[in-house]
Amino acid sequence: MNHEDCIDALHDHHFGELDRARDEQVRSHLAECGDCALEYCRLRADLDRLDALATARPGPAVRVALRAKVESEFTPSAWSRLVAFCTLRVPIYQPVAVLALVVAVVALAWPTDAPSSARTDHPTVVDQFDGSDVRIVDHRVL
Ligand SMILES: [Zn+2]
């Protein structure tokens, strides 16, 4: 085996992808050739650094910052959620939601018949009330 063949086979040798005879040729050449052995050491160091990068995890500060950025970019606003809900393509939900919204708006905007109590400077005072002497105001119910 010459230098070029050995260099070409180093990657496959490292990952165990060579057949037994070819792997043995690479091993014996690496045992005899300092240049190829040095190249194999460099390749292993590079591959180890790549493995370390693949298993590296971000620190807690980076995770917190990343989560905040993702939430700020991808969390929809209340208005856009309401619009999305009202435009939902589910046959029954959309008319029911629009009807409920109209009923709620009308109920809030409709004037009430109840008399409004006006504030007065003279508070109501019940004085000398006798519950046994109740006067009947309307005789039609009797
Ligand atoms: Zn060599």
Image: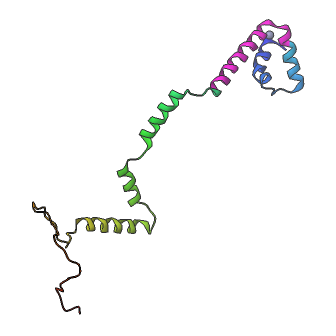
Which picture quadrant has residue 111? bottom left
Toward the left, the furthest residue is: 121
Name the spot of residue 57 as percent of width and height, x first: 60, 28
Name the spot of residue 17 as percent of width and height, x first: 80, 28
Q: Depth check: give the residue in front, 54 or 93.
A: 93
Q: Depth check: give the residue in front, 83 or 61.
A: 61
Q: In this view, does 113 lie to the left or right of 77?
A: left
* Residue extent of the magenta highlight: 29-53
Q: Which residue is drawn at 20% across and 82% down?
A: 134
Q: Decide whether residue 42 is among the magenta residues.
A: yes
Q: Residue at x 22, y 69 (%)?
A: 110
Toward the top, the furthest residue is: 34
Instruction: Work out whether 136 lies above or below 52.
Output: below
Q: Answer with the quadrant where ligand 1 appears in the image.
A: top right
Which picture quadrant has residue 102? bottom left
Q: Give the quarter of the figure containing the N terminus.
A: top right
Q: Give the quarter of the figure containing the C terminus.
A: bottom left
Colour logic: rainbow
Q: Is residue 138 left or right of residue 20?
A: left
Instruction: Work out whether 100 lies above or below 139.
Output: above
Instruction: Work out whether 26 lies above or below 130.
Output: above
Q: Could you tell me what secondary structure mostly forms the magenta stretch?
A: helix
Q: Depth check: give the residue in front, 115 or 100.
A: 115
Marker count (numbered): 0
Name the spot of residue 37 as percent of width and height, x first: 78, 10
Q: Residue at x 85, y 12 (%)?
A: 29
Name the spot of residue 81 as percent of width and height, x first: 40, 53
Q: Decide whether residue 76 is among the magenta residues.
A: no
Q: Which residue is drawn at 40% across and 65% down?
A: 94
